[in-house]
Image (cartoon, rainbow, N blue to C red):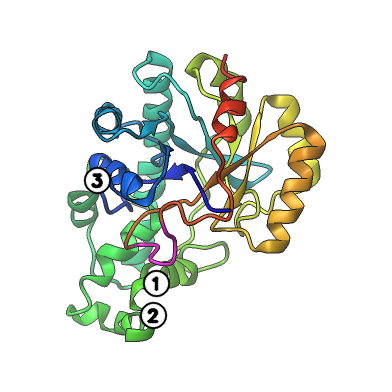
Amino acid sequence: MGAHVDLHIHSNKSSDGEYSPSEIVVLARATGLRAIAVADHDTVAAYPEALEAGAAEGVEVIPSMEVTTVYDEREFHLLLPFLSWGSSVVTNLEKEVSRRRFKEAAERVGKLKELGFDITWEEIVSKTAPAAPLGVTIAQVLLEKTDRPANRELKRYLKVEKKNFAPYHFYKDYFMEGMPACVPRQNIPLVEVLEIAPATGGVPVLAHPGAYFQRTTREDIAVLKDRGVRGLEVYTSYHDAEKTRFFKEVADAFGLVATAGSDFHGAVKPHVKLGGLERGEYEMVEALRKWRP
């Protein structure tokens, strides 16, 4: 069928995104997308640039953000399409989430230094500011410094056959639960974000429920729907055919809008294509719009 909308895209306002907001819009037009949502990690810094580019290119741009949260001791990502990106509520949410993410990132870098890696907090921040450094971004910076004696063992991550995936391989080996540089999650509680979501103007959509770090269950979705979740990202690069079928059935059963979002980042996720989704009808946008506060 092919996609006409992609409601989960990252620009370089996310510390791990490659393209600027305006470049994203140009790519979307070239791909034939009618509507997109630039949903950067914990920031709306893509706006107003993305909106201005959308008007110029004839692509509908829906303001959004991907908020990193915690629920039942698991990391959950929440999309907020249609949010009022310039509101004080959104600004305050950004600040609180950023404070938590910077603290977590600093602790990750500290752990790496304890493990003997030659890296400094200043090097990381200089590459990612003003965005909070994500784990995969820290890995990218570190992997650029394999010439340092303490970092030479990292060259094994840069083998030709997996070079593009090196940051994610490092992330899994060092930052995931039980790994040597893992630090406790310090994300804002998902329930707190759902409580203020109506004041943001956004429509809460649970991103990639089948992601390995979320492990979202049917029971989770039942509770979160009662807390205000209105959409479920069914069509995503995180889901295989079996997960797609399962979450489509769950969305239908709970009356949630089944949405489509690639989670496109560019170089850091070379296997994920902008708009490269099995589904993505404009009706998804119309259904979400009906839930706007």
Rendering quarter of residue 222 = top right
Of the two numbered discs 3 and 2 in the rendering, the one whose residue sits closer to the viewer: 3
User: How many angstroms separate mark 1 from mark 3 (CA)?
Assistant: 23 Å
Element under disc 1: helix
Mark 3: amino acid: Glu
Residue tagged 2: 162
Per the image, the residue denoted by label 3 is: 23
Classify the position of the C terminus by image quarter. top right
Identify whether 182 is placed above or below 279: below
Pointer 1 residue: 165
Q: Report crowding for label 3: few under 14, some 14 to 19, many 20 or more residues within 10 A (C-alpha).
A: some
**Which span of residues is magenta-colored?**
268-273
Quadrant hosting residue 290: top right
Q: Nearer the viewer, mark 1 or mark 3?
A: 3
Q: Residue at x 25, y 63 (%)?
A: 141
Label placed on residue 28:
none
Residue in front for this viewpoint, 110 or 161? 161
- The dominant secondary structure in magenta is loop
Whichever of labels 3 and 2 marks the residue nearer the N terminus, that label is 3
Task: Give the residue drawn at x 32%, y 62%.
Answer: 267
